[in-house]
Image: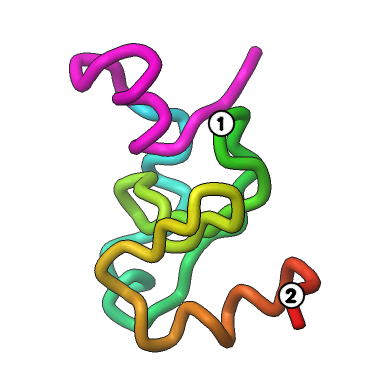
């Protein structure tokens, strides 16, 4: 079965469906800028917050509301 982040889930299926990435981390993790690595069928390799929302998306360039530290975290995926 395909897994989708919050943005892709809403894009493909509508806001009434729960996204697959929700709950991979805690609200406390998000406050500390700690995000879960997630493989989304729409985005590819991405980072998601506790709600399953992309905070960094290499494919779509989405950086959400956590822009200041995302560049450093994204190096996990091999960016230069």
The question of residue 7 being in magenta is answered with yes
Tell me residue 35's x, y (percent).
Answer: 48, 66
Secondary structure found at label 2: loop
Q: From this viewpoint, which residue is outermost toward the left?
A: 16
Q: Residues within 10 Å of mark 1 (few under 14, many from 20)?
A: some
CA distance for labels 2 and 1: 19 Å
Q: Which residue is mark 2?
A: 79
Choose between 2 and 67: the one closer to the eye: 67
Residue that appears at 58% across and 79% down: 73
Taking 54 as reference, is 38 left or right?
A: right
Taking 47 as reference, is 17 left or right?
A: left
Residue that appears at 27% across and 77% down: 31
Choose between 73 and 29: the one closer to the eye: 73
Choose between 65 and 36: the one closer to the eye: 65
Tell me residue 27's x, y (percent).
Answer: 27, 64
Residue that appears at 41% across and 57% down: 62
Q: Is residue 41 above or below residue 25?
A: above
Mark 2 and 1 residues: CB-CB less than 8 Å, in contact?
no
The question of residue 30 being in magenta is answered with no
Picture quarter with the N terminus: top right
Picture quarter with the C terminus: bottom right
Q: Which residue is mark 1?
A: 42
Taking 34 as reference, is 67 left or right?
A: left
State which region is magenta. Answer: 1-18
Taking 52 as reference, is 1 left or right?
A: right
Residue that appears at 72% across and 74% down: 76
Residue 11's image quarter?
Answer: top left
Q: Residues within 10 Å of mark 2 (few under 14, many from 20)?
A: few
């Amino acid at each position: 079965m395909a897994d989708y982040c919050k943005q892709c889930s809403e894009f493909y299926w509508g806001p009434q469906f729960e996204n697959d990435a929700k709950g991979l981390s805690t609200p406390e993790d998000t406050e500390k800028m700690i995000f879960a690595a997630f493989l989304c069928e729409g985005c590819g390799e991405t980072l998601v917050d506790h709600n399953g929302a992309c905070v960094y998306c290499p494919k779509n360039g989405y950086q959400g509301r956590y822009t200041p530290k995302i560049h450093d975290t994204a190096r996990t995926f091999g960016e230069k």
